[in-house]
Amino acid sequence: MAVNKNSNALKVVGTIFAGVGLILVAVGVGIGNHQYTILKSWPVAEATVMRSRVRQYISQRGRRMYETEIEFRYTVDGKAFDTPSSPGYSTSSYSSMKSIADEFAPGTRHLIRYNPSEPSDIRMNAGYNFGFFFLPVLMGGLGAFFAALGIVLRFASRSVQPLLCPACGQTVERGQRFCPNCAAPLTTGTSPFTSS
């Protein structure tokens, strides 16, 4: 009864957590694989920064946020492209975004990676660095945490032992004095059925 309900609840919650965790791990692996593909197969081009600025906006939570917008000019197969890009994240720290805008000041030259099948699709920060792999690491880490928690909860559900009536074997709740199935008395001097 109550013990079975607790055990079943732990199983259900554990299964949900483990399922969500495995989905997050799969998403993290997928994103990480895509980032790795960019590093391995997208060509590098030297680009000139045409424009760089810090843009301010108000988030859905009402916080003032900043992001850096940068426009690159580069050439692929003799064709010039002017393509906007950004670091891929925003922050409430103006100085953090300003330092990126200063690093990518107009006229400076930087290496970018571009999609060979769509040269206007570029990555300005592609590399084996934390920023480029932040999202897959975050998703994979959260997924591993939720999956592990789900597995622990599922194992915990197995350790919850039901109390059984010694006369008929029916599950009974702690604190009952008589079995609801056969009315056998459950209260003896050392009975686990009574609350202490």
Image (cartoon, helix red, strand yellow):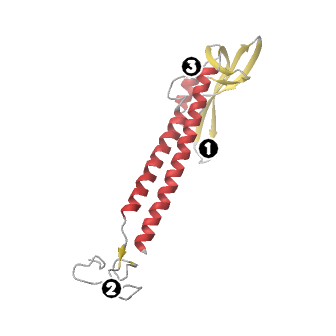
Q: Amino acid at mark 2?
A: Arg
Residue 146, position in %: x, y? 47, 49
Residue 22, position in %: x, y? 52, 46
Residue 117, position in %: x, y? 73, 23
- Looking at this view, name the residue that lies furthest to the right: 79
The structure residue drawn at horizontal position 40% and vertical position 71%, both measured from the top left corner, is: 3
Q: Nearer the viewer, residue 176 or 169?
A: 169
Instruction: Give the alpha-carbon distance from disc 1 to disc 2, as whole Å.
Output: 59 Å
Residue labelled with disc 1: 59
Q: Is residue 65 above or below residue 174?
A: above
Residue labelled with disc 2: 177
Q: Are marks 2 and 3 in contact (CB under 8 Å)?
A: no
Tag 3 or tag 2, which sits nearer the N-term? 3
Residue labelled with disc 3: 103
Q: Are marks 1 and 2 in contact (CB under 8 Å)?
A: no
The structure residue drawn at horizontal position 48% and vertical position 59%, both measured from the top left corner, is: 13
**For the residues carrying marks 2 and 3, which lies nearer the camera in this image?**
2
Tag 3 or tag 1, which sits nearer the N-term? 1
Q: Amino acid at mark 3?
A: Glu
Q: Quadrant for the N terminus, please.
A: bottom left
Q: Are marks 1 and 3 in contact (CB under 8 Å)?
A: no
Q: Quadrant of residue 97?
A: top right
Give the numbered dot on residue 108: none
| Dot 2: element | loop
Is 193 left, or right, of 75 in this rendering? left
Q: Quadrant for the C terminus, please.
A: bottom left
- Looking at this view, name the residue that lies furthest to the left: 189
**For the residues carrying marks 1 and 2, which lies nearer the camera in this image?**
2
Is 167 left, or right, of 43 in this rendering? left
- Looking at this view, name the residue that lies furthest to the bottom: 183
Q: Nearer the viewer, residue 41 or 158?
A: 158
